[in-house]
Image (cartoon, grey):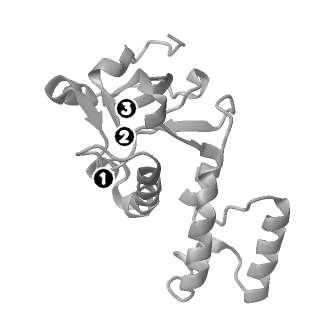
Amino acid sequence: MDTIRLYTRQSDKTLLMLEHGGRIVNQRVYVQLHFGDMSKHYLECYDWFAAQAARRVPKPEGAELSIWCTPNVKNCLPPIEGTVVYAVDAPEEQVVFFDDAKWDYVLNHRYLPANDADEAAYRKHLQDIGAANSFEFFEGRYAGKYPEETQRVRDSWMRVFDPVERTCPTVCGNIWEIRQEQIVRIFRPGETVSAV
């Protein structure tokens, strides 16, 4: 089984999960605690991602959301107070690869164009119907009024999973769990995250 080295910064409370359960999984409640008043928006996006990711790699029991990781050590956020960074060897077939730059379209409820021509055509479409941007179909003046437009935007988000080179600076590789035996190293605040 081929593995890939991934890096992820997580709350240091995950160390207790490892100690008591031998693995780390992500739950919706953690997003609620982290984002507070904004959690509804983020959960809508993360729930969409989780549903699509589960079609590619089945979720293990107890996992609700995926764990954000990067195969590029240079893109990993450094450990700060209250966090640690895990270097993990994950089975490659259990990793959902996607383009993090495209993920911003999902977070901002924007249409994710296939290419420049598609983007130009979509802008023209918005102009023709009198909308400034696709966000308006979710939380703006057109929220709930044009379900077909909302669905069109959601369908475009599937492009976040278009094949992306592993060496691309914006590639991410999410996993459903981190098992104790997969951890190569844990970096703590004050330590520099480096390839191991």
Looking at the rendered image, the quarter that the N terminus falls into is top left
Residue 59 percent across, percent down from the top left: 33, 46
Residue 153 or residue 107, whichever sits in front: 153
**What's the residue at 64%, 73% (across, down)?**
134
Circle nearer the viewer, 3 or 2: 2
Using the image, tell me which numbered label, if any, was put on residue 176. Answer: 2
The answer to whether mark 1 and mark 2 are in CB contact below 8 A is no
Residue 153 or residue 74, whichever sits in front: 153
Question: In the picture shown, does residue 124 fall above or below 156?
Answer: below
Query: Mark 3 or mark 2: which comes first in sequence?
Result: 3
SS class, disc 2 = loop
Q: CA distance from mark 3 to mark 2?
A: 14 Å
**What's the residue at 31%, 54% (across, down)?**
32
Q: CA distance from mark 1 to mark 2?
A: 13 Å
The residue labelled by disc 3 is 10
Residue 141 visible in the shown view:
no
SS class, disc 3 = strand
Residue 158 percent across, percent down from the top left: 59, 59
Q: Is residue 118 left or right of residue 179?
A: right
* Type of amino acid under label 3: Gln
* Type of amino acid under label 1: Arg
Judge the density around disc 1: few (<14), some (14-19), many (≥20) Cα neighbours within 10 Å: some
* Type of amino acid under label 2: Trp
The residue labelled by disc 1 is 28
Residue 187 percent across, percent down from the top left: 40, 16
Q: Is residue 61 left or right of residue 126?
A: left
Judge the density around disc 3: few (<14), some (14-19), many (≥20) Cα neighbours within 10 Å: many
Using the image, tell me which numbered label, if any, was put on residue 18. Answer: none
